[in-house]
């Protein structure tokens, strides 16, 4: 697998298994070691590349261990400290990283709970780990703009100088994005006052703030929804709904597939597109993302491999207001409809989705 595919495959594994991971050791075995090996490409069983339980005595502190040290040419390049997957990441969890960072040659320190990875360096003071990460990777919500930077830390593409030179910009862009997101979720008084002043000419009294405050929050939410809808509409306009005219007819057990060629006046909903992304993420543990496509019809929303009617991965029956169904087909193209109450229920059928993908491969 190439780098993005390996990252997405691990993200899917985290989605499927994170509820079952309750201890730090389980977190390391299930998520962190695969991140180091399958994503970054280091051999976790080669002590010349990865040293578990790395020890570097610090002052009066003796015998303390860091979970992993990633080596290159006999020198420590990255330090990795793990916490249990059930806990959030806080700066106080990084105390060992601080100490080890100062006594090794490492320029990169990683604090993780297996789901979220905080990457630190020494931008503020030489050889002293920063208090804030320059890169935050959340496997449940991967920021695609960070993937190319993360790849620079992999074994095959290791480019420490490039990472360090970009770290300052990444750090502040990341902090700004999180600050902006927080303002959209819960506007501060200063943020609200700024926008009120753009539409209200009078004095901004407490009464005016009380009146306009909820409107600022509502406008921010509607703006984000409009942006999402515009991008989805643009994607749909650019999507191809033409069928493969040379493809043979679907078997008699599956006559409804003809609707894909016959239907017009199709309305694709945001919920269908979100469900499609979930199925695609599951399927991407076995195939590259570009091979998973979608076609909508009046009867159902089809998710296909290689944009081929003969390779249905799943069907979304979302037209009924009373009950939604996820349709999955067996080897004879017989469909079983599974009721789902929320999109998260799709993950319960991950194994069947992957089986369909593997069957067509």
Image (tube, rainbow, N blue to C red):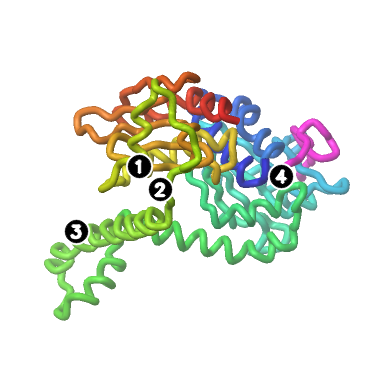
Query: Is residue 126 placed above or below 344 in the rendered structure?
Result: below
Counting from the top left corner in percent of width and height, residue 269 is at 29, 45
Q: Position of residue 354 (x, y in %)?
A: 53, 28
Q: Nearer the viewer, residue 240 or 128?
A: 240
- 264 or 100: nearer the eye? 264
Tag 2–tag 1 contact (CB < 8 Å): yes
Quarter of the image for residue 184 reads bottom left
> Is residue 21 something one can see in this rendering?
no
Residue at coordinates 59% horizontally, 57% vertically from top-left? Answer: 134
Q: Earlier in the sequence, mark 3 or mark 1?
A: 3
45 left or right of 288?
Answer: right
Residue 305 lies in magenta, yes or no?
no
Task: Give the spatial CA distance, label 3 vs label 4.
Answer: 45 Å
Q: Which residue is mark 4?
A: 79
* Residue appearing at x 44%, y 57% in the figure: 178
**Real-space CA distance between mark 2 and mark 3, rounded to the nearest whole angstrom:** 41 Å
Callout 1: helix, strand or loop? strand
Q: Which numbered disc, 2 or 3, marks the residue closer to the eye?
A: 2
Q: Please identify the dominant SS of the magenta region.
A: loop
Q: Residue furthest right?
A: 74
Q: Quadrant of the N terminus?
A: top right
Query: Distance from label 1 to label 4 (Cα)?
Result: 47 Å
Residue under label 1 = 296
Pointer 2: what residue? 241
Task: Report the Cα–Cα distance between label 3 and label 1.
Answer: 37 Å
Find disc 3 in the rendering and name its residue: 214
Tags 1 and 4 touching, CB below 8 Å = no
Residues packed near mark 4 inside 10 Å, few (<14), some (14 to 19) or many (20 plus): many
User: Badge 2: few (under 14), some or many (20 or more) residues near its Cα, within 10 Å?
Assistant: some
Residue range in magenta is 41-59
């Amino acid at each position: 697998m190439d780098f993005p595919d390996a990252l997405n495959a691990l993200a899917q594994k985290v989605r499927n298994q994170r509820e079952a991971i309750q201890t730090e050791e389980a977190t390391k075995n299930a998520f962190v070691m695969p991140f180091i090996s399958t994503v970054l490409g280091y051999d976790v069983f080669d002590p010349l590349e990865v040293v578990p339980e790395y020890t570097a005595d610090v002052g009066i502190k003796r015998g303390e261990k860091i979970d992993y040290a990633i080596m290159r040419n006999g020198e420590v390049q990255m330090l990795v400290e793990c916490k249990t997957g059930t806990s959030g990441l806080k700066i106080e969890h990084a105390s060992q990283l601080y100490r080890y960072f100062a006594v090794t040659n490492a320029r990169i320190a990683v604090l993780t709970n297996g789901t979220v990875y905080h990457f630190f360096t020494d931008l503020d003071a030489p050889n002293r780990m920063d208090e804030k990460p320059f890169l935050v990777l959340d496997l449940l919500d991967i920021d695609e703009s960070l993937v190319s930077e993360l790849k620079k830390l992999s074994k095959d593409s290791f480019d420490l100088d490039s990472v360090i030179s970009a770290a300052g910009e990444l750090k502040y862009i990341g902090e700004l994005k999180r600050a902006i997101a927080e303002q959209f979720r819960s506007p501060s008084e200063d943020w609200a006052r700024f926008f009120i002043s753009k539409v209200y000419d009078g004095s901004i009294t407490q009464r005016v703030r009380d009146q306009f405050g909820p409107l600022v929050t509502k406008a921010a939410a509607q703006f984000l929804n409009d942006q999402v809808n515009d991008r989805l509409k643009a994607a749909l306009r650019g999507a191809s709904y033409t069928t493969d005219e040379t493809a043979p007819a679907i078997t008699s057990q599956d006559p409804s597939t003809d609707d894909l060629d016959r239907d017009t006046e199709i309305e694709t909903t945001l919920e269908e597109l979100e469900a499609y992304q979930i199925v695609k993420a599951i399927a991407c543990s076995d195939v590259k993302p570009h091979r998973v496509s979608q076609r909508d019809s009046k009867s159902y929303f089809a998710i296909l491999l290689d944009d081929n009617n003969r390779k249905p991965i799943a069907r979304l029956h979302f037209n009924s207001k009373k009950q939604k169904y996820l349709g999955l087909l067996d080897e004879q193209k017989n469909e079983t409809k599974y009721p789902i109450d929320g999109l998260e229920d799709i993950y319960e059928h991950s194994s069947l989705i992957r089986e369909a993908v593997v069957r067509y491969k």
